[in-house]
Every structure is written in structure tokens, then in C-alpha cells.
């Protein structure tokens, strides 16, 4: 048998080419792709809407505040009245005289070993006890007459008795029938003293007292050498209290 050549019925080059065509996208797939886009648009619209609304409110508030500030600046300031102690109707403040100022003339007086000053236009009269070693000055804004038609509001007195300040304090409270008393430590230079203040007891018989019932009285006591000095007065009125304090400020012991 003769060998016959093997022949192939086909060749690689003769193979038919494969054609790839684009597949159509179903309608449902298109809808799924559009949903995220629509959600993004809606969220953006909501964010910008809320932001615009907030900015609008802030602008309106700023304009309203600016208008209120302009209105407040143009308005006249309001001064609230202050009521004095006791709840009475407000009154215009009255300037109090100052006796320690160089612009106001003062009268300089001396009692034993004490120099002091009073307003220049005040009345004063010196007295002395012929039995006890006591001297004093009666002090008043005007002359109380001769004999006195009114009791001078202040008296500065000196007596030669070696009494401790605390003992003198008890004597002052008892003599003038003072209640609701207040005691303070004070000084004039290096000289120590006490301030006793209180209300005259309205239930006590004080016909011989220089102070009326319910008057508010203050007494200051200083001990200097062998002498005890007392300045006493009715300080119910603010003006009297001011001058009382200023007289004490002029005390100079020697």
C-alpha cells in the first residue's frame, strides 16, 4: 500500500471571523441609573433652600438690631429717681456746707487743750460751771436768743475727771436715754475715742433732757490728759450729721 499524503480539509486562515455586536440596555437598567442622580439633585436643592432661609433670617435680625441700636442712641437717657431713707418722695440733693475747705471761712475756737473750727456764720457761746470743773461751747446755726428759746443742736464740753472711756460710754447712754445704740472706735490724730449713737427712748420721761423724744443723737468722747471731751448733738437731719462729722475732723489736741 502506498503512503498517501494527509490533507486537511480546513486551514486556520480560512476560519470565519466572529462579529461582536453591542447588546441593547434594558429600560429597567436606565431607570436604576437615574435614581442616584435625582436624589443628588433633590438633596442639593434642600440644602441650598435651608441655607438661604437661614441667611435671610440672620439678615433680617441684623437689620432689626441695627435699627433698635440707632433708635436707642437717639433716645434721651432716663435717670431713675432715688428715694431718701424712709421712703418719702424723691427730693433734689442739697449741697452740704464744708467747713474744712479753704474756700469757706471758719471760726477757730479753743476749749481747754482742744482747738476746733465751726462754720464762720454759726453762733457759739462759751459757758463754765462755777462748782464743777466743767466748761463748754454751745453751737448752733443761728442765735437761739437770750435766754435760749431753742436748745442749741450741738454742745462741746470738757470736764476734768479721770474716767475711762467705756465707763463714760455707759453714763452717756443712761443720761440721754438712748436705745438701739451703736458704738464705734474713732481717733483724732493719736488720740483715741468712742462714738455712741442711738435714738432717744420715747417711753422715758426726759423733761430735763436737751433732746426731744425719738431724736437721733450722737456723742463722741475723747480722753486727753486729765480731761474728757464730749461733742454731742441731734444728728437726725443729714445736714447736721455732715457738719457734726466735719467739726470732729478739725479737732487738734495740744
Image (cartoon, rainbow, N blue to C red):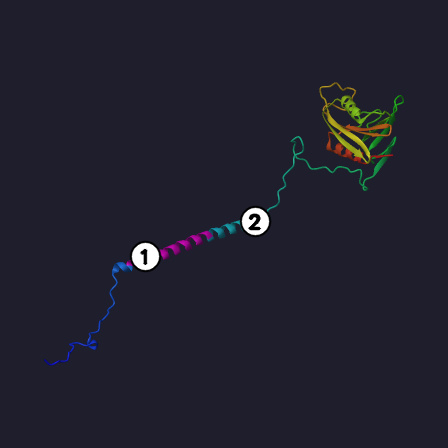
Q: How crowded is mark 2: few (under 14 residues within 10 Å), some or many (20 or more)?
A: few
Against 26, is 236 above or below? above
Task: Inspect this view and state whether residue 155 appears.
Answer: no
Query: What secondary structure is the magenta-colored segment mainly?
Result: helix
Task: Inspect this view and state whether residue 31 appears.
Answer: yes
Q: Where is residue 173 in the image (x, y as percent from the top left)?
A: 76, 23
Q: Give the residue at x 29% y 58%.
A: 31
Q: Give the residue at x 44% y 53%.
A: 51
Quadrant placement of the N terminus: bottom left
Range drawn in magenta: 31-54
Q: Mark 1 points at which residue?
A: 35
In the picture as drawn, the residue positioned furthest to the top comes out as 205
Q: Name the residue under label 2.
A: 69
Which residue is more in the foreground, 20 or 231? 20
Quadrant placement of the C terminus: top right
Left or right: residue 184 compared with residue 68: right
- From the image, state whether disc 1 or disc 2 is nearer to you: 1
- Residue 246 quadrant: top right
Q: Give the residue at x 58% y 47%.
A: 72
Say whether residue 60 is magenta.
no
Q: Position of residue 194 (x, y in %)?
A: 78, 29
Closer to the N terminus: mark 1 or mark 2? 1
Which residue is more in the foreground, 58 or 18? 18
Amino acid at each position: 500500500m502506498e503512503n498517501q499524503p494527509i490533507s486537511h480539509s480546513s486551514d486556520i486562515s480560512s476560519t470565519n471571523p466572529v462579529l461582536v455586536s453591542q447588546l441593547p440596555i434594558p429600560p429597567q437598567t436606565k431607570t436604576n441609573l437615574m435614581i442616584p442622580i435625582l436624589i443628588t439633585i433633590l438633596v442639593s436643592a434642600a440644602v441650598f433652600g435651608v441655607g438661604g432661609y437661614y441667611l435671610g433670617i440672620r439678615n433680617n435680625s441684623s437689620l432689626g438690631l441695627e435699627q433698635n441700636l440707632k433708635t436707642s442712641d437717639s433716645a434721651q437717657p432716663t435717670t431713675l429717681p432715688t428715694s431718701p431713707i424712709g421712703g418719702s418722695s424723691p427730693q433734689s440733693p442739697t449741697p452740704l456746707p464744708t467747713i474744712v475747705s479753704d474756700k469757706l471761712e471758719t471760726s477757730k475756737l479753743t476749749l481747754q487743750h482742744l482747738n476746733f473750727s465751726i462754720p464762720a456764720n454759726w453762733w457759739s457761746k462759751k459757758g463754765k460751771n462755777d462748782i464743777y470743773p466743767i466748761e463748754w461751747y454751745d453751737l448752733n446755726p443761728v442765735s437761739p436768743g437770750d435766754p435760749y428759746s431753742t436748745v442749741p443742736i450741738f454742745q462741746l464740753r470738757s470736764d476734768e475727771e479721770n474716767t475711762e472711756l467705756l465707763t463714760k460710754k455707759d453714763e452717756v447712754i443712761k443720761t440721754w436715754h438712748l436705745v438701739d445704740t451703736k458704738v464705734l472706735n474713732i481717733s483724732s490724730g493719736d488720740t483715741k475715742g468712742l462714738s455712741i449713737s442711738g435714738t432717744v427712748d420715747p417711753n422715758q420721761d426726759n423733761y430735763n433732757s436737751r433732746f426731744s423724744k425719738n431724736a437721733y443723737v450722737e456723742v463722741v468722747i475723747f480722753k486727753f490728759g486729765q480731761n474728757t471731751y464730749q461733742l454731742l448733738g441731734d444728728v437726725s437731719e443729714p445736714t447736721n450729721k455732715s457738719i457734726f462729722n466735719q467739726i470732729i475732723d478739725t479737732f487738734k489736741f495740744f
